[in-house]
Image (cartoon, rainbow, N blue to C red):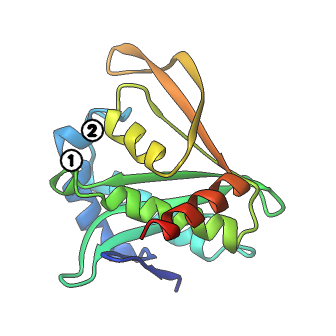
């Protein structure tokens, strides 16, 4: 079972029983705002979590979507992951979601930082990318805190909830990440 520790989080592989905690936050209206879904059914969320569990068994494994857990209470509060396109890829995409009850506390940034670091250090990536709905200002802040640069804006790329949404594209290169991590250490 894959696990990573950060200052305040345990990032671990999903187990099928995690679906109830995921369902609790994926049905929150604030969570649903920037997703295609208008609602979530228990069976949808069960399949969502089973997909992560199946991907853990892949040989070789290339998808690392981990549950975000508060170690003191064991409460699952979201997930974060990194997904190369294929085994020999030098590029991967990060993604994360967080229970709205925990927004604004830096948990998404902390988890995403750990996963990007894992990608560069252990997966030997050259580039990590991310995308988000342009109006999702909290997600944009997370990506910028990671040192990611905005590469572009795909105008009216996604259609959901009765309208078109712009999507922002971000990336960080290994040398930028390494340089940024050295400056963070130097400022501590």
Q: Position of residue 4 (x, y in %)?
A: 47, 80
Describe the element under mark 1 as helix, strand or loop: loop
Question: Do we see residue 60 in this rendering?
Answer: yes
Task: Using residue 10 as the reference point, say whether residue 84 is left or right of it.
Answer: right
Q: Which residue is mark 1?
A: 27
Q: Residue at x 58, y 74 (%)?
A: 56
Pick whichever, 174 or 45, lies toward us. 174
Residue 104: x %, y % from top left: 22, 51
Q: Nearer the viewer, residue 147 or 30?
A: 147
Q: For this rendering, which residue is in front, 44 or 103?
A: 103
Quadrant hosting residue 42: bottom left
Q: Residues within 10 Å of mark 2 (few under 14, many from 20)?
A: some
Q: CA distance from mark 2 to mark 1?
A: 7 Å
Q: Is residue 33 above or below residue 122?
A: above
Residue at label 2? 32
Is the Cβ of the residue at disc 2 closer than 8 Å to that at disc 1? yes
Residue lying at 59% horizontally and 66% vertically, measured from the top left: 182
Q: Position of residue 85 (x, y in %)?
A: 73, 52
Residue 27 locus on image (x, y percent): 21, 47
The C terminus - image quarter: bottom left
Residue at screen point 51% across, 61% down: 81
Label at residue 123: none
- Whether residue 65 is visible: no
Location of residue 75 with respect to 22 vertically, above or below? below
At x 50% / y 71%, what residue is drawn? 53
Occupied quadrant, residue 83: bottom right
Query: Helix, strand, or loop for circle 2?
Result: helix
- In-image side of 117 versus 111 (left or right): right
């Amino acid at each position: 079972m894959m696990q990573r520790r950060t200052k305040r989080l345990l990032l671990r592989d999903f187990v099928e029983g995690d679906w109830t905690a995921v369902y609790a936050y994926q049905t929150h209206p604030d969570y649903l705002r920037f997703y295609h879904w208008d609602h979530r059914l228990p069976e949808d969320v069960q399949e969502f979590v089973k997909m992560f569990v199946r991907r853990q068994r892949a040989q070789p494994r290339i998808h690392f979507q981990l549950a975000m857990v508060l170690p003191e209470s064991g409460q699952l509060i979201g997930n974060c992951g990194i997904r190369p396109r294929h085994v020999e890829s030098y590029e991967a995409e990060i993604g994360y979601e967080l229970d709205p009850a925990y927004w604004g506390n830096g948990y998404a940034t902390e988890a995403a930082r750990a996963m990007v670091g894992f990608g560069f250090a252990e997966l030997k990536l050259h580039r990590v990318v991310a995308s988000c709905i342009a109006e999702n200002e909290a997600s944009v802040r997370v990506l910028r805190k990671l040192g990611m640069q905005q590469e572009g804006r795909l105008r009216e790329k996604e259609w959901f909830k009765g309208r078109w949404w712009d999507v922002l594209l971000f990336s960080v290169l290994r040398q930028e990440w390494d340089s940024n991590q050295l400056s963070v250490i130097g400022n501590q």
